[in-house]
Image: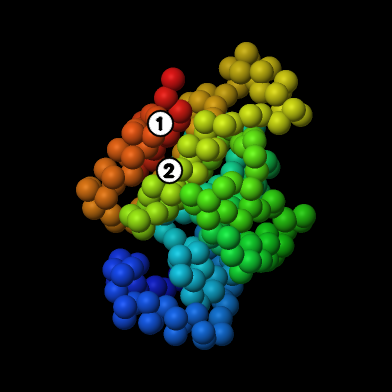
């Protein structure tokens, strides 16, 4: 299996560093190069196309995706039957895996960028998902393009990289969780499932997040404290896995 190569130093460069900005401008002017790599997920191989550069690192498949996929398989009863949106989908690999493994109703989303959207669609097609997964272009903190969010589970992997984006991410999370309204075609199903005890482990709605990128404890606290200050409740439920929900 080919592993995407990247420079760790590029991930933690000071975003105010002019040399870093000049490098980004130079790279963005260079024509993209693409590579399709086979990656091993629990129970299957996926072919994922990655590309050479993106200013928010949405071009590569990150190691945390595999760890989160393993955890979700181990807790499959917590996600089966859920209506899911993934934040920071990047290449779309995790959403593709979950759809193929559990036939989940899942929507991808990422930064408002056509290149990301087209790459996720490509990866869906080469892995046999047609029509492709629905996708929402959304930059955190901006007005969400869906007025009444109808996803009862929000997931994400390895998105706590840019500290300056934390408050914007929290703004988006608050909108998705506090304004949640189930779709009319799912309300009766949800009520029946809840009475039958089909949904276990994770409340509705909730945000389930995992990460493996190394960030400082201080930065980690900034995000979780920010969530608490915004009226969200944070619970550690596994190895670097957290469940965040509206405070009751």
Return the residue at label 2.
170
**In-front residue for pair 12/180:** 180
The residue to which callout 1 is attached is: 232
Give the mark nearest the N terminus, 2 or 1: 2
145 left or right, relative to 69? right
Percent x, y for residue 212? 36, 53
Image location (x, y in percent) of residue 199 = 57, 24
Q: Is residue 163 visible?
A: yes
Report the residue at 66% width, 29% height from top: 182
Which picture quadrant has residue 84? top right
Marker disc for residue 23:
none
C-beta proximity under 8 Å, tags 2 and 1 = yes
Q: Position of residue 96 (x, y in %)?
A: 62, 53
Please report the residue visible at 57 percent of the width from the left and 77 percent of the height from the top. Answer: 34
User: Which quadrant of the rendered structure holds the C terminus?
Assistant: top left
Task: Write the residue at 76% across / 29% down.
Answer: 185
Label 2, label 1: how many angstroms apart (C-alpha)?
A: 9 Å
Residue at the extreme top: 195
């Amino acid at each position: 299996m080919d592993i995407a190569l990247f420079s760790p130093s590029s991930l933690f460069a000071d975003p105010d560093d002019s040399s870093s900005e000049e490098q980004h401008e130079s790279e963005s002017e260079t024509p993209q190069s693409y590579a399709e790599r086979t990656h091993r997920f629990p129970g299957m191989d996926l072919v994922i196309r990655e590309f050479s550069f993106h200013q928010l690192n949405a071009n590569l498949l990150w190691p945390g995706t595999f760890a989160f996929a393993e955890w979700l398989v181990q807790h499959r009863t917590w996600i089966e039957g859920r209506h899911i949106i993934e934040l920071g989908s990047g290449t779309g690999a995790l959403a593709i895996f979950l759809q193929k493994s559990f036939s989940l109703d899942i929507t991808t989303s990422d930064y408002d960028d056509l290149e990301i959207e087209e790459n996720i669609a490509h990866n869906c097609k080469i892995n046999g998902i047609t029509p492709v997964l629905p996708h929402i272009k959304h930059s955190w903190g901006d007005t969400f393009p869906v007025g009444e969010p109808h996803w009862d589970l929000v997931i994400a992997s390895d998105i706590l990289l840019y500290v300056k984006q934390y408050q914007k991410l929290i703004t988006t999370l608050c909108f998705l969780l506090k304004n949640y309204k189930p779709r009319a075609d799912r309300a009766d199903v949800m009520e029946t499932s809840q009475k039958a005890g089909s949904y276990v482990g994770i409340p509705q709605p909730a945000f389930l997040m995992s990460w493996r990128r190394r960030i400082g404890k201080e930065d980690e606290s900034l995000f979780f404290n920010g969530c608490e200050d915004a009226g969200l409740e944070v619970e550690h439920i596994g190895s670097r896995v957290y469940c965040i929900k509206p405070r009751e």
